[in-house]
Image: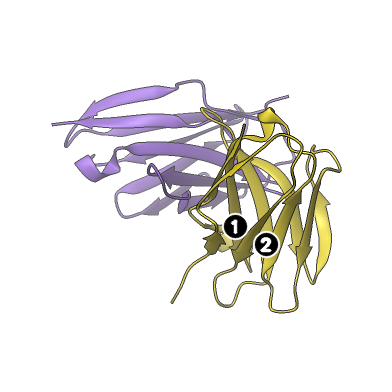
Chain colours: A yellow, B purple
Amino acid sequence: DAGVTQSPTHLIKTRGQQVTLRCSPKSGHDTVSWYQQALGQGPQFIFQYYEEEERQRGNFPDRFSGHQYPNYSSELNVNALLLGDSALYLCASSFDRSYGYTFGSGTRLTVV
Amino acid sequence: DQQVKQNSPSLSVQEGRISILNCDYTNSMFDYFLWYKKYPAEGPTFLISISSIKDKNEDGRFTVFLNKSAKHLSLHIVPSQPGDSAVYFCAASVGDDKIIFGKGTRLHILP
């Protein structure tokens, strides 16, 4: 049983560009959350999708947007990239919080 | 405002001994607490959780203790093994709200 799959694994972008990161949740999971993890920090919540709608949002600017498809897969889009957006972006899926989130291995984004 | 705090960036423990990782929180509305383990180049892996109606939950070598009056929880690993060397994140949530993570504690198990 495949867990959470994220693509790509690594990405280098230039300031001002736009990026799309992709996530396929674990089979049976219907909720997808996105986190940003900067170096030496814990994961910071970006937003969560459920039933193709953004259900919750963290303290991130509108440059960060997302989408969830009917098959529960999800995308994270970041516009007008800044150097400070360089981080590990983690996707997590879940269906019941008592089992915690299942995380993917992340996408390492470097903005130069 | 850091709602979940892990004040020890790192901890070294002898193999076979007990590892105790600590976590404090400020939001008294948190009703669910989790511990995650993370190896380099991998995503965090769920370890163990505890509901606020309990004060202890055990799963094999891992035990989580919750002290609501002190807003403190701890993860005990007994006995510590080399494969336990990783970064451990404490996390908490309110209802079905987002999970909030601490900054993590790097655990080194010494031979």
Tell which of B101 and A27 is nearer to you.
Answer: A27
Is residue B3 visible in the rendered image? The answer is no
Amino acid type at circle 2 is Val
Q: Is residue A83 above or below residue B97?
A: above
Q: Is residue B89 left or right of residue B13?
A: right
Q: Secondary structure at mark 2?
A: strand
Rendered image quadrant of residue A87:
top right
Q: Chain of mark 1?
A: A
Tell which of B37 and A59 is nearer to you.
Answer: A59
Quadrant of image for the N terminus of chain A: bottom left
Q: Which mark is residue A92?
A: 1
Picture coordinates of residue A72, whole percent (x, y):
69, 73
Q: Is residue B105 left or right of residue B31?
A: left
Q: Chain of mark 2?
A: A
Q: Is residue A39 left or right of residue B61?
A: right
Tell which of B4 and B60 is nearer to you.
Answer: B4
